[in-house]
Structure formats: structure tokens, C-alpha cells
Amino acid sequence: MIAMRRVLRKLLVGSVLLLGLHQAASAQQLVSIKGEKVNMRAEPTLAGEVLFQLGKGYPLRVIERKGSWFHVVDFENDKGWVARQLTSKTPHTVVKASRANVRSGPGKGYRVLRQAEYGEVFRVLAKRNAWVRVKGEDSRTGWIAGRLLWGD
């Protein structure tokens, strides 16, 4: 009987730990801005001060949920709140380096198509090793080294 209680206690503790890990992991999901101009606010309410306006596709990491709002952080570590319905799970990324070469293939040996600037947002199309295939606002595609990007 005592052995059975120990087993049940271990199972209960393990279940609680797994539930906590699942909640923490799901709270750290990445989302992207769905609209053209979305307000990031200081508080999770429409009356909250507008801190920034975010453009379409801008990637954010969710750090907390409160009702219909996400508490988010961006690649510059700015934090605020956005309405959940104004976000999407469509993967996007942002250039975190001062400049990044957009190449014709996933490697340094491929031709440079253009240079992307700090803060430029791209839709993520694919990943191969340490490279990310992206699509820009102008619909052109290319590959960028993942270490130069933040987001998906």
C-alpha cells in the first residue's frame, strides 16, 4: 500500500511538472502581425497607451496571455500588449544584423541578390541547415543565414 502511494505521488508530481512545462512552452510561441498597422500597447486594453505601431508580418514572441491579449516581446526586447485577433501564426522573421545578404541559395557560395537592412521583415518559406528561405514585401525570394535573423 505504501509503495502504491509513492508511485501515485510520483505520477501526480510528474503530471503537474509536465503541465507547467507545457504552459510555459505554449506561452513562448511566436506570432506575426496580421494587419497593416497594429498598435502595441502598454496595457492589455484599448485604453492602454500606444507604444509602437507594428507592420504586417512583424514577428513577436508571446510571453503571457491575458484574456484576448498577448503580452509580447520583439527582437529589440521591447515589450507590450497586442490583441490576439490581430496576430497570425504565419512564420515571419526580421533582420537583426545591420545588413544581411539575400542569396540565391542556402550558402555563402550562392550569388547575392540584394542586401536586407536591419529591421526588415520577411515571410519564412523554408529552412535548410543554418539558412532560411524568405519572401520580402516585394514578393522576391532568397536565402539568408539564420544567425542574422530573429523569429521563426
Image (spheres, rainbow, N blue to C red):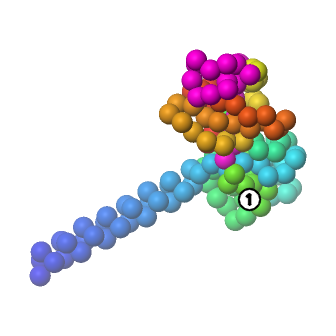
Image quarter where the C terminus lies is top right
Residue 77 seen in render: no
Which quarter of the image is occupied by the N terminus? bottom left
Q: Residue furthest bottom?
A: 1
Q: Residues within 10 Å of mark 1 (few under 14, many from 20)?
A: some
Q: Quadrant of residue 26?
A: bottom right
Asked if residue 110 lies in the magenta stretch, the reply is yes
Relative height, residue 5 to residue 144 (above, below):
below
State which quadrant residue 76 falls in.
top right
For residue 107, say whether it is visible.
yes
Q: Position of residue 146 (x, y in %)?
A: 58, 30
Say what amino acid the circle numbered 1 marks.
Arg
Q: Is residue 102 magenta?
A: yes
Circle count: 1
Stretch of the chain drawn in magenta: 91-113
Q: Position of residue 21 (x, y in %)?
A: 44, 57
Dot 1: element: helix
121 versus 148 height, above or below: below
- Residue 39 position, x and y percent, is 84, 47
**Residue 94 occupies which quadrant of the picture?**
top right
Where is mark 1, residue-wise?
84
In the image: residue 145, left or right of residue 54:
left
Between 132 and 82, which is closer to the camera in this rendering? 132
Residue under the point 58% across and 17% down:
109
- In the rendered image, residue 122, in percent from the top left (x then y), is placed at 73, 37
